Image: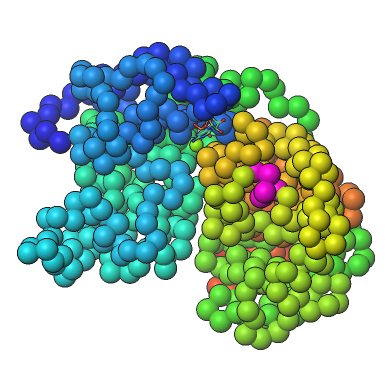
């Protein structure tokens, strides 16, 4: 990156003209024009599959457009790879994991630049780790040691390392693709600080998020994409949530967003429960019952134990003490839970809920095998196709066809595949850990309405979430966890206040 650069506020730094990109029958970008100016934090917003990741990843050298032009610092811009783009000043924190699991944090951070630490063919690990730790501390990450193996870190920590890896190169343009969804408040603050500094230094930022409140707060300008087209660009003083939503989905949202009633009644029968359940280091002595026709919300800060609790309800974690029961029977493991019609959407969707390298069809069909197979071996393919198609249609999953590999779907569409998998096979109990993470409003609304319908049909639904509005909006009963224990329980009511609930989280 040239150091002699002068950074004047308002100078055009990146210009994209007439860009088109297709994937088979899908037009991801349709003749798009975009301008980015120094000192500007430009938000990109739009429903899943609208083209946000595609346009940014082309600018960042991850893939190539079919046609169109890019100019960066006034010159033609055609990066050969992401590393090449980053070297020349455009860096992107990608939406789906951009790190390598089997090597250390330090090696991830300096990937492609490890030579500077090698002498006679050996890497000076001590120096590498020290430098990487310095990079982490500089942006305020103090709980990750650079010698740790990447794969041992949780989702949030992996994301923070990715941020460090890009920031270390101090790009002129920083692209942040749906990163904050994976972060707790502390992680977000780290990123917001970087964004703020980039604005002040007259660099530029492209900030992608599906969280409207966040994006209005963080950005100076906001461009709305829909189906690969740029619909409208809003300046800060024009920001208006209703107008923005309207241009995102192209129509007014009809009906309720969450449920509109305040009636917390449900069936008598206890379907799933935890008795004195303990998983050391995560949760202690948890007693909990959920009923037929009940939506039970579970909230708290990200390390309060609620994600482990969700795993315990699906038999996906070993209890050190106590037990988990479904209709009175002990939940032995995940296979047993699936047989007993428990469906589970994991927070770590990509690693736990989906086979990324398999097709949409195979992912959806896997839990429904009982329905369209005879005995253990014979699969009725026509029935399977019909079953898969029904899920794709009813959840409006955006894919070129059911053979598309799940890895290539946008985040929200991946989530819909997970939903389709469990709802299609007739789950009686759904344990949903952050079910709407990375999903945008139009789809979220459809999911909420679907969950409400399932409640009315008598299903038990457990929503574990870091988003308080959704918990308050949907739950019959809301349990707040803190430090691995249940701290408070609220019944559905008009009078619940978020301030009071948050008080029990922290
Ligand atoms: N590698 C790919 N293969 C096939 N289709 C893709 C690929 N990448 C993106 N798409 C499709 O292009 C469209 C735009 O995707 P994307 O840019 O990821 O949307 P967004 O980031 O706005 O959610 C979607 O319909 C998506 O399924
Ligand atoms: Mg995306």
Query: Which one is nearer the viewer's eye here, 38 or 262?
Result: 38
Query: Which one is nearer the viewer's eye here, 454 or 489?
Result: 454
Query: Which one is nearer the viewer's eye here, 223 or 410?
Result: 410
Residue 330 occupies which quadrant of the picture? bottom right
Tell me where residue 416 appears, x and y as whole percent.
66, 43
Q: Is residue 361 left or right of residue 237?
A: right
Which residue is at 59% across, 49% downward?
358
Tell me where residue 202 appears, x and y as whole percent.
23, 30
Tell me where residue 371 appears, x and y as whole percent.
84, 53
Q: Is residue 149 visible?
A: yes
Which residue is at 12% across, 55% downward?
116
Residue 294 occupies which quadrant of the picture? bottom right
- Magenta-colored segment: predominant secondary structure: helix
Q: Magenta includes 362? A: yes
Q: Is residue 219 visible?
A: no
Query: Which one is nearer the viewer's eye here, 152 or 23?
Result: 23
Say how the picture is coloured.
rainbow
Q: Considering the image in quadrants, where does the N terminus appear?
A: top left
Which residue is at 58% across, 60% downward?
352
Considering every residue shown, the one lying at the far front of the view is 378
Up the image or down, 48 lies above or below 353; here it is above
**In the rendered picture of this protein, how many numbered marks are placed on residues?**
0
Q: Is residue 141 left or right of residue 314?
A: left
Which residue is at 26% across, 60% downward?
107
Considering every residue shown, the one lying at the far bottom of the view is 321
Q: Magenta includes 400? A: no
Tell me where residue 233 appears, x and y as whole percent.
46, 18
Residue segment shown in magenta? 360-364
Up the image or down, 370 lies above or below 262; here it is below
Up the image or down, 343 lies above or below 445; here it is below
Residue 463 occupies which quadrant of the picture? bottom right
Q: Is residue 319 left or right of residue 121?
A: right
């Amino acid at each position: 990156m040239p150091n002699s650069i002068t950074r004047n506020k308002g100078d055009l730094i990146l210009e994209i003209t007439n860009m088109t990109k297709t994937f088979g029958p899908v037009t991801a970008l349709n003749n798009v024009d975009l301008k980015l100016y120094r000192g500007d934090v430009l938000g990109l917003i739009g429903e899943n599959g609208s083209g946000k990741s595609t346009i940014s990843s082309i600018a960042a050298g991850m893939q190539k457009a079919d046609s169109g032009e890019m100019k960066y610092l006034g010159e033609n811009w055609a990066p050969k790879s992401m590393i090449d783009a980053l070297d020349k000043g455009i860096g992107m924190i990608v939406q789906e994991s951009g790190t390598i699991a089997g090597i250390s944090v330090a090696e991830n951070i300096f990937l492609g630049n490890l030579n500077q630490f090698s002498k006679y063919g050996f890497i000076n690990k001590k120096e590498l780790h020290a430098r990487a730790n310095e990079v982490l501390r500089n942006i305020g990450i103090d709980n990750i040691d650079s010698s740790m193996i990447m794969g041992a870190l949780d989702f949030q920590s992996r994301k923070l390392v990715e941020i460090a890896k890009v920031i270390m190169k101090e790009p002129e343009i920083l692209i942040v693709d749906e990163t904050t969804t994976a972060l707790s408040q502390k992680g977000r603050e780290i990123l917001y600080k970087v964004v703020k500094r980039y604005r002040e230094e007259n660099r530029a930022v492209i900030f992608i998020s599906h969280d409207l409140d966040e994006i209005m707060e963080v950005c100076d300008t906001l461009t709305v994409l829909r189906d690969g087209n740029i619909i409208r660009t809003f300046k800060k003083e024009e920001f208006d949530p209703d107008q923005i939503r309207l241009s995102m989905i192209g129509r007014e949202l009809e009906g309720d967003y969450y449920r509109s009633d305040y009636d917390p009644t449900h069936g008598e029968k206890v379907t799933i429960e935890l008795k004195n359940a303990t998983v050391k280091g995560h949760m202690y002595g948890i007693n909990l019952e959920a009923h037929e026709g009940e939506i039970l919300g579970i909230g708290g800060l990200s390390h309060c134990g609620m994600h482990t609790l969700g795993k315990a309800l699906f038999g996906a974690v070993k209890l050190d003490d106590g037990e988990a029961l479904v209709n009175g029977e002990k939940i032995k493991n995940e296979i047993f839970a699936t047989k007993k019609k428990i469906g589970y959407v994991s927070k770590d969707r990509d690693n736990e809920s989906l086979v990324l390298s398999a097709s949409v069809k195979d992912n959806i069909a896997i839990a429904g095998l009982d329905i369209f197979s005879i005995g253990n071996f014979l699969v009725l393919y026509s029935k399977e196709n019909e079953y898969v198609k029904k899920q794709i249609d009813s959840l409006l999953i955006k894919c070129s066809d059911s053979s598309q590999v799940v890895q290539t779907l946008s985040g929200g569409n991946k989530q819909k595949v997970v939903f389709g998998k469990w709802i299609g096979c007739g789950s009686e109990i759904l344990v949903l850990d952050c079910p709407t993470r990375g999903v945008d409003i139009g789809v979220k609304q459809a999911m909420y309405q679907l969950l409400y319908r399932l409640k009315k049909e008598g299903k038990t639904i457990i929503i574990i979430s870091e988003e308080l509005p959704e918990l308050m909006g949907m739950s019959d009963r809301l349990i707040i966890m803190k430090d691995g224990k249940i701290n408070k329980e609220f019944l559905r009511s008009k009078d619940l206040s978020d301030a009071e609930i948050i008080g029990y989280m922290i």
